[in-house]
């Protein structure tokens, strides 16, 4: 009888300890919500005037930090840039020696191109990060049209008004991770 009680107590202690690790441990949370390519993200954030945690959140949603990805629509790299958009960014920003292959496989290039584009959208929408993230997914023309027609005001608390379900979900996920990252990495940047 005593042996069973000790086994139950030991099991209860182990379960309690594991639960404590999941609930209270920053290292466990950082393990579950990592930020890879931190130096590249910091450099691009600095270069293009963005919050590095926003870049990290976009990457997390787009590819979960896995290089070599290509979406079913043809978007490439960590930040899933469409080839036409990448060509526009490369020409507009004056990047050189960037190919679809480097965009697809080199994290630093993908982060730089994607961050430049996100910064461009951020400026286009007068610093409205929520609208910029929506435009990153749906295209700036769609977001402008929604805002001009009063369909959506560009705010997070009215994101349910975004007519594209994919974009609505995308914005919610990006800002979910952004807020997680703010809590876990307060000095990142």
Image (cartoon, rainbow, N blue to C red):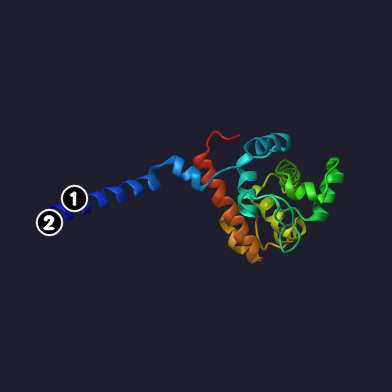
- Write down the residue under mark 1: 6
Quadrant that contains the C terminus = top right
Q: Secondary structure at mark 1?
A: helix
The residue located at (38%, 43%) in the rendering is 24
Between 83 and 5, the residue placed more toward the observer is 5
Give residue 140's mark: none
Please provide percent x and percent y for residue 187.
54, 33
User: Dot 1: within a 10 Å radius of its alpha carbon, few (fewer than 14), some, or many (20 or more) residues?
Assistant: few
**Dot 2: what SS?**
loop
- 1 or 2: tag closer to the N-terminus: 2
Horizontally, is 64 left or right of 135 in the view? left
Which residue shows up at 83% across the image and 55% down it?
84
Label 2 CA crowd tier, 10 Å (few <14, some 14–19, many 20+): few
Above/below status of 162 relative to 123:
below
Residue placed furthest toward the left: 1
Mark 1 vs mark 2, CA separation in Å: 9 Å
Q: In this orientation, which residue lies closer to the viewer: 151 or 156?
A: 156
Residue 104: give x, y in percent of width and height. Answer: 75, 50
Q: Quadrant of the N terminus?
A: bottom left
- Residue position marked by numbered label 2 in the rendering: 1
Q: How many discs mark residues in the rendered view?
A: 2
Q: Residue 151, how many percent across, how many down?
A: 67, 63
Q: Position of residue 35 (x, y in %)?
A: 58, 42
**For residue 183, side relative to residue 120 (left or right):** left
Left or right: 144 as drawn, with respect to 94: left
């Amino acid at each position: 009888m005593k042996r069973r009680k000790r086994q139950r107590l030991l099991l209860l202690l182990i379960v309690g300890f594991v639960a404590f690790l999941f609930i209270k441990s920053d290292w466990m949370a950082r393990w579950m919500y990592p930020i890879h390519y931190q130096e590249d993200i910091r450099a691009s954030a600095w270069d293009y005037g963005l919050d590095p945690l926003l870049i990290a959140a976009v990457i997390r949603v787009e590819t979960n930090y896995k290089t070599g990805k290509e979406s079913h629509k043809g978007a490439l790299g960590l930040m899933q840039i469409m080839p036409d958009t990448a060509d526009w960014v490369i020409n507009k920003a004056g990047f050189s020696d960037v190919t679809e292959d480097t965009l697809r496989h080199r994290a630093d290039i993908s982060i730089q191109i994607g961050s430049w584009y996100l910064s461009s959208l951020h400026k286009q929408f007068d610093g409205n990060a929520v609208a910029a993230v929506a435009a990153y997914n749906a295209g700036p023309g769609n977001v402008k049209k929604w805002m001009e027609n009063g369909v959506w005001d560009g705010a997070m608390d009215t994101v349910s008004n975004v007519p594209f379900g994919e974009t609505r979900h995308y914005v919610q996920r990006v800002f979910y991770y952004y807020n997680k990252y703010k809590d876990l990495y307060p000095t990142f940047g």
